[in-house]
Image (spheres, coloured by chain):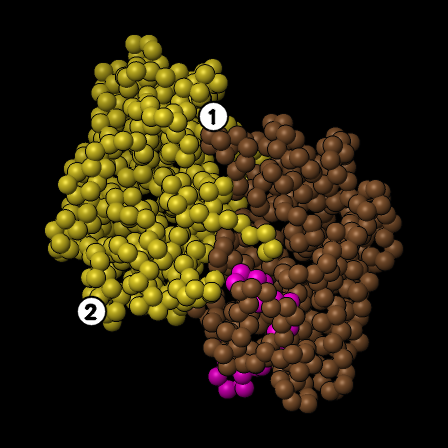
């Protein structure tokens, strides 16, 4: 990326829950402090973090250390951070990173990270000061679909660029494939791991970034159901999700489990029967889109350690890939996501629609509602979310492929 | 991520690769595979333990592996096994008991004849990596690949028939033995393929060296130690540079550096001053996903030269001068990086070409770099046609031997007329991209 030399350097505020080693704020915020690898160069964004708000300071807090070293200030309120101690909005972009920290769970098992509350205070400053700047929100917009919708509505009403979501859509893929724009997708399956609601969110957004490219774009979700335990396997036998797509997804997995960890042997997990033994508590997130597409997220802890996707295009053509999550401590997927944030702040244009994140946030919220109500199917008239995918492929290395 | 994956660099080193390459030589005696029949294969191995090369390769033949959108089961039958050592943790007997067609024989000849009196297989795999073998005074492990090969050729001669032979990793620790192996295959006319998984695994980003590129200088960096990872990094370099204008014409001189001499090279101003192009070094580190943090409390930060010198305890570099003027540096920087990356400066192109050859990164995320290697071996065994020239691995074998020799002579610059090996690359790209 060419380093702009003549335009003034942009000023950033970071609004976060906590900043300690390996928290999202650290590995994302540091990209703007020390740079990151990009296209074979160590890239240093032509922008400066000038202010920080941290909601909590747990043991290992690095906020003051970073502020001292990199010449910015930690402010006691979000408004002060955005105004950098003055009386008017004094930054050109805001990063909301509300992941990690000690926050209560609600009755659906969602961590109530205060992203909406942070966002609300940011919007108040924008309105009071008569100026708005691009905002990035890490991960889902909110645990609540209603709050997520309000956030998107506020960005539309005030007309500021907004980018949000997970790093999976923009990380590297193995293989590096994209759903062709306007492809007819007949069925899709995503495989994910980890706990709810941090990790199922990542999986849902990864799936959504593929499905939104289908014919006629995104037109919303009609109903969802989250099922658990043996019902997940039964649903597969009943044809509610496809074993063929599971094979196609698992063929992209690069993790090992079960007998493979014991003595190395490779496994055909989709058909050997060991999957059902390895996964003690499977969950299937069954999603019915308004245009008839059926998609499933299988969370199969114990069987894999990575995130894979498969879909059937018209006919027998199957496309599958792994969303690669490079390991700690570099977690190099962060470079992919922060490059998109940098792009938005530099250009004033969000590189992909925030509705993707709204959709994934809302699907998750409704699936967890289904779980709470005894795994019943729920109609989701509120998920009438419509948008078009960007034409340009934006996953890691997509622009460099030869 | 809220639930980060665990990292184990030790595992990265343990689960190391092996390779793919093959002969341009037209086979005079066609391999004896009949199209309608599944090829029967013998494997001659040093040991069969979890994550040993024999295990990761042979289990993929026995159990299949993820390929494209399927769990792929190779269309060949592994029928006989010669196992040189049975250490604690041996799995060969368990495999032989579970797979009816597979038998373990006490000698190589018996394995090749499957217990009968004539060569009874259609392909041979020599996997001589891991196991308890002595080291020579230069620190090379004396894996018996050449001996396995010799015994195989003896059976071919006696029984009047040959088959394709695949050799995992470099051909031998010894240049003369390696040369003899390639010459023997050529003179007897059987297809011969060898090498590392590096050339065929995923690349991040997924890029190929343009055919006919004018390459001026190349740097490859990896973890690990001499006589092991140097070979992998060299294969990663060679599979790219062999595509340059005019094809491969070989190497004229090799000089190895170790310890402080490597840091002097790092601080030197380019190749002529005894160093390397700093932008290529940077490109390599910027393609790594496992760049060790130079500062406490930072997860990803670019190291200063002082950081690099502090972090790498036993740096090793091979400076390689090719016959046509190309210059290459193979750098082992264990402690700095956990993966293998290559960068090249191309004439007329401002930014370096650079990529990572992806090996997986966690104990439980290994060793899927063997999937494409086994796929290529399968194609080789069923078609008799190597997907890559054996000369690549002959050259990289010779480069390891020359590097080790130079190290043993305190970094003496060695003339390498024997490495003036000429070959043309497979015009098709063979790394995993679908």
Whether label 2 touches label 1, CB < 8 Å: no
Q: Position of residue B10 (x, y in %)?
A: 39, 45
- Please state the chain letter of the residue tagged with numbered disc 2 in the rendered image: B
Q: Report if residue A312 is visible in the image.
A: no
Give residue B391's quadrant in the image: top left
Residue segment shown in magenta? A2-25
Q: Position of residue B341 (x, y in %)?
A: 38, 55
Residue under the point 80% across and 76% down: A157
Give residue B114's quadrant in the image: top left
Q: Position of residue B117 (x, y in %)?
A: 30, 9
Graded by Cα atoms within 10 Å as few (under 14), some (14 to 19) or many (20 or more), the crowding at tag 2 reads few
Which residue ends up furthest to the bottom in the rendered image? A87
Front position in the image: A297 or B392: A297
A124 left or right, relative to A253 = right
* Sequence-wise first label, 2 or 1: 1
What hue represents chain A?
brown
**Disc 2 marks which residue?**
B273
B169 left or right, relative to A259 = left
- As drawn, the label of residue B62 is 1
- Please state the chain letter of the residue tagged with numbered disc 1 in the rendered image: B
Q: CA distance from mark 2 to mark 1?
A: 52 Å
Residue under the point 62% across and 84% down: A84
The vertical placement of A326 against B41, above or below, is below
Query: Magenta stretch mostly in which secondary structure?
Result: loop
- The kind of secondary structure element at disc 1 is helix
Residue B234 is a magenta residue: no
Colour-to-chain, yellow: B
Q: Report if residue A325 is visible in the image.
A: yes
């Amino acid at each position: 990326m060419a380093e702009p030399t003549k335009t003034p350097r942009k000023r950033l505020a970071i609004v976060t829950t906590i900043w300690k080693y390996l928290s999202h704020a650290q590995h994302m915020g540091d990209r703007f402090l020390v740079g990151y690898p990009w296209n074979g160069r160590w890239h240093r964004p032509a922008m400066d973090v000038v202010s920080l708000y941290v909601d909590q300071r747990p043991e290992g807090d690095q906020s003051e250390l970073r502020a001292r070293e990199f010449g910015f200030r930690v402010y006691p309120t979000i408004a002060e951070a955005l105004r950098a101690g003055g009386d008017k909005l004094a930054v050109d972009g805001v990063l909301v990173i509300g992941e990690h920290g000690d926050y209560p769970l609600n009755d659906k098992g969602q961590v109530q990270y205060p992203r909406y509350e942070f966002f609300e205070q940011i919007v108040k400053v924008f309105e009071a000061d008569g100026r708005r700047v691009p905002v990035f929100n890490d991960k889902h917009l909110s645990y609540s679909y209603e709050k997520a919708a309000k956030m998107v509505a506020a960005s539309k009403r005030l007309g500021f660029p907004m980018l949000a979501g997970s790093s999976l859509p923009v990380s590297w893929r193995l293989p590096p494939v994209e759903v062709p724009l306007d492809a007819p997708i007949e069925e899709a399956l995503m495989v994910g791991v980890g706990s709810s609601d941090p990790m199922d969110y990542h999986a849902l957004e990864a799936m959504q970034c593929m499905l939104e490219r289908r014919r006629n774009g995104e037109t919303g979700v009609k109903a969802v159901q989250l099922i658990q335990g043996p019902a997940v396997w039964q649903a597969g036998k009943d044809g509610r999700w496809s074993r063929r797509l599971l094979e196609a997804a698992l063929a992209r997995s690069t993790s090992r489990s079960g007998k493979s960890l014991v003595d190395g042997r490779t496994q055909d997990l989709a058909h050997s029967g060991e999957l059902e033994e390895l996964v003690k508590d499977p969950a299937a997130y069954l999603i019915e889109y308004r245009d008839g597409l059926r998609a499933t997220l299988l969370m199969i802890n114990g069987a894999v350690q990575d995130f894979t996707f498969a879909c059937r295009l018209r006919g027998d053509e199957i496309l599958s890939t792994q969303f690669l999550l490079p390991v700690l401590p570099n977690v190099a997927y962060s470079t992919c996501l922060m490059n998109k944030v940098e792009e938005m702040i530099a250009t004033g244009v969000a590189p992909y629609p925030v509705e993707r994140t709204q959709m994934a946030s809302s699907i998750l919220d409704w699936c967890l509602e289904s779980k709470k109500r005894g795994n019943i199917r729920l109609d989701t008239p509120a998920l009438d979310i419509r948008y078009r995918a960007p034409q340009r492929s934006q996953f890691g290395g997509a622009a460099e492929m030869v | 991520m809220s639930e980060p994956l665990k990292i184990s660099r030790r595992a990265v080193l343990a689960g190391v690769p092996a390779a793919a390459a093959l002969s341009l030589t037209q086979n005079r005696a066609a391999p004896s595979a009949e199209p309608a029949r599944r090829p029967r294969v013998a494997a001659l191995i040093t040991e069969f333990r979890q994550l040993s090369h024999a295990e990761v390769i042979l289990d993929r033949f026995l159990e299949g592996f993820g390929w494209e959108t399927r769990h792929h089961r190779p269309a060949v039958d592994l029928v006989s096994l010669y196992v040189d050592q049975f250490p604690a943790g041996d799995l060969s007997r368990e495999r032989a008991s579970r797979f009816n067609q597979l038998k373990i024989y006490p000698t190589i000849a018996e394995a090749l004849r499957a217990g009968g009196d004539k060569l009874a297989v259609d392909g041979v795999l020599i996997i001589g990596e891991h196991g308890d073998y002595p080291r020579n005074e230069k620190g090379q492990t004396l894996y018996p690949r050449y001996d396995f090969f010799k015994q195989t050729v003896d059976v071919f001669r006696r029984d009047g028939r040959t088959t394709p032979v695949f050799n995992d990793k470099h051909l031998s620790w010894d240049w003369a033995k390696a040369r003899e192996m390639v010459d023997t295959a050529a003179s007897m006319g059987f297809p011969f393929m060898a090498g590392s998984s590096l050339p065929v695994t995923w690349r991040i980003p997924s890029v190929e060296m343009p055919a006919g590129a004018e390459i001026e200088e190349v740097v490859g960096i990896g973890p690990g130690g001499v006589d092991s990872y140097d070979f992998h990094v060299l294969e990663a370099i060679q599979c790219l540079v062999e595509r340059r204008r005019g094809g491969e014409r070989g190497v004229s001189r090799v000089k190895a550096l170790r310890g402080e001499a490597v840091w002097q090279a790092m601080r030197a101003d380019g190749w002529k001053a005894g160093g390397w192009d700093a932008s290529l070094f940077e490109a390599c580190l910027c393609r790594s996903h496992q760049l060790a943090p130079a500062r406490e409390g930072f997860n990803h930060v670019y190291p200063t030269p002082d950081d690099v010198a502090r972090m790498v305890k036993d740096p090793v570099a091979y400076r390689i001068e090719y016959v046509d003027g190309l210059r290459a540096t193979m750098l082992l920087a264990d402690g700095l990086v956990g993966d293998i990356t290559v960068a090249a400066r191309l004439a007329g192109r401002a930014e370096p070409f650079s990529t990572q050859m992806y090996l997986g990164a966690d104990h439980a995320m290994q060793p899927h770099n063997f999937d494409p290697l086994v796929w290529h071996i399968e194609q080789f065994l069923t078609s008799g046609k190597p997907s890559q020239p054996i000369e690549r691995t002959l050259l990289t074998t010779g480069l390891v031997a020359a590097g080790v020799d130079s190290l043993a002579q305190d970094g003496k610059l060695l003339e390498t007329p024997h490495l003036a090996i000429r070959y043309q690359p497979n015009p098709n790209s063979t790394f995993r991209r679908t």
